[in-house]
Every structure is written in structure tokens, then in C-alpha cells.
Image: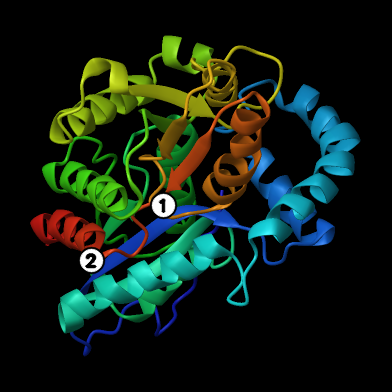
Amino acid sequence: MKAIEPIDSSVYQHDKALKTGILITNLGTPDEAKPAALRRYLNQFLSDPRIVEIPRWIWWFILHGVILRIRPKRSAKAYAKIWTDAGSPLLAIANAQAKAIQAYFEDRAEVALGMRYGNPSIESALEQLKAANVDKIIVLPLYPQYSAAATASTFDAVSDTLRSWRWIPQLNFLTHYHDQPLYIKALAEKVSAYWQAHGKGEKILFSFHGIPKRTMIAGDPYYCHCLKTSRLLAEALELPEEAWETVFQSRFGKEEWLKPYADIRLEELGAAKTKRVDVLCPGFSADCLETLEEIAISFKGVFEDAGGGEFHYIPALNADSNHIEMMTHILEQQL
């Protein structure tokens, strides 16, 4: 357990006005698209017991004996395909989101960005809020659908830092917004605008990050949240039942994950000579490796190699104005 910090004037200043803090969080990103940076990032990510739920001593040997010897180099090549002059797309977009939210609230709140893994860390973001003399912190993890691996892990990181604070601010932790009307509206408008500009495919897949099936059986509501998001979005777009499907991507390891698997389904659609398929990733609040490389590059190849026609990836909501409107609306309710 962390020791309580000693007396420090930055902890609480009696003569300074109190503020509300807003902590925006996302998964995170490596500092560079290089093997050494990926090794640090993956070590932190895969050491989280919320991510890999097997006995620690077994996993330690697998992680350090096999995975961290092989995967960093492979992952670095994948990141290199999407890396920009501004660095990681996820971090650049997250910074733009935080900046827009700060502009909306002006001096009514202090906004800080913290990543669950990598930099800037959740701890550094909380220290920024502490320095602003906040007595209330609203935490908004940008995961629309709740999962223990993402949302609960964020709570762990926040609480780990707060354990050493002398004065714990009031904490409002937002756990999901998978059926929030403005979220569904923003997604529907994103798809409609894309179709207006680029035409419309025969089928649209709503692809969510997968989780092991056993975690759903253990009580994680993620699968239900994903299905409800898909249903509400399909209703908003007035899609017939045969025009859309929910799929799951990014599985890891040999155990069964949530199905149907996105790559397998795209291979089937390609083999069926589908003329065009569109893919949207509603669970990702910002474009990242899983959308820009896995979906838009790798899975596009799977579809086309199987005999499919056109493949269109519809970008995430990112820092779109209606996405910012949705986030500020949720946060405003907490203020």
C-alpha cells in the first residue's frame, strides 16, 4: 500500500478557489512505433490482471518468456503503418478531444487527459487536477460499452493514485454510455454522412473489440451493451435486418472469444462475392491501431483476398463536433 503523502502545499491550498476536475481517459499508446517502446507498453498492458485473468505466476512466464520476446517487433511494424507526423493517431485525437472539452467548460472545470497505459498516465493527469485545487473529479473513460478489462481497469488506476492522497475529492466515475441518445445520434450521423459522400454498401458490420467468452459468462455486461448499441444504431439508420451485423475483432490467444469473429465473417462475405461491405467500429471513440491497421488494412485484405468487392472503413467519431457535444452533455449532467 502506498504511504500517505507528507504535507505539501500543492495538495490543498486553503487560500485558493476550489474547482471541478474532469479526467478524460482512453486505453493508451506506445511512445514510438519501435520495438523497445512496444515492449514497455505491452509489458504494462499485459501485466494488468484485468486484461489477462489467469494465475499471475503462470502468466509471468508466458509474458516474459514468450510474448515480450516476439510481439513487440510485430506490433511495431503494425504501428508504423499508421504512425503520423503528430505521432500516435489515438493520442493526437485524444488531445484534440480534451482540448475541445476544455474550451467548452472554460474556467468552470479543469480538464486533464490520462491514458490507462503509456503516456500521459492517469497518475500524471490526476496530479494536474490536484495542482488545480479540485475538490470534485468526474472521470469519463471513453469506452461506450462497459467491460472489466477497460472500464474497471481504469477505476483501478484512478484508485491506486488516490490511495496516497491526503484529501480525496468527490469522485464521479462514469461507467458507460452505450445507449446514450446523443451517442447513437452521433454514430448515425457519421454513417449517413459517409454514405452520402461515398455511396452505400450492401451490408454494414458494426465491429467491436472482443473479450473472452468466459468473462461474459462470469457477468461482464459488455456483450449486451454492444448488441444494444448496434440495435439502436440500426434503428436510427432505418436499416432492414439483413443489412447489418454485429461482429467482434482483436481476439488474442486460443480460447473462445465473443462471436462472430470479424475476420471470419469478412472472409465469408468475400467468398460470397459481396460487392461492397462497410465497417464501423462504434466502441472506439478514436481511431487507433485496431481500426486503422487491423480493420482498414488487414481485414480489408481478408475480404478482398476471399473474392469480395469494395471495402469501406467508416472513421470513428474522433473529435467531431457532435461527438464533443455528446461528451460535454454527459459531463454537464455531472457538474
* Mark 1: amino acid: Pro
Task: Of the two numbered discs 1 and 2 on the same chain, state the one appearing first in sequence.
Answer: 1
Q: What residue is shown with label 2? A: 321
- Left/right placement of residue 207 relative to residue 81 reads left
Residue closer to the observer: 187 or 141: 187
Three-letter code, disc 2: Ser
At horizontal 49% and vertical 73% (from top left) the residue drawn is 6
Q: Which mark is residue 147?
A: none
Residue tagged 1: 315
Question: What whole-number distance in Å separates the C-alpha atoms at marks 1 and 2?
Answer: 14 Å
Residue 300 appears at what percent x and percent y? 59, 38
The vertical placement of 85 against 146, above or below, is below
Q: Is residue 4 visible?
A: no
52 versus 312 height, above or below: above
Choose top left, top right, bottom left or bottom right for residue 19.
bottom left
Which quadrant would the C terminus be assigned to in this image? bottom left
Task: Describe residue 329's horizontal placement relative to residue 60 as left or right.
Answer: left
Q: Nearer the viewer, mark 1 or mark 2?
A: 1
Mark 2 element type: helix
Left or right of residue 257, residue 324 in this image: left
| Horizontal and vertical percent position of residue 72 | 81, 48
Residue 241 horizontal/vertical position (percent) = 24, 16
**Residue under the point 58% across and 33% down:** 51
The answer to which quarter of the image holds residue 135 is bottom left
**Depth order, front residue of 260/3:** 260
In the figure, 294 relative to 232: above or below?
A: below
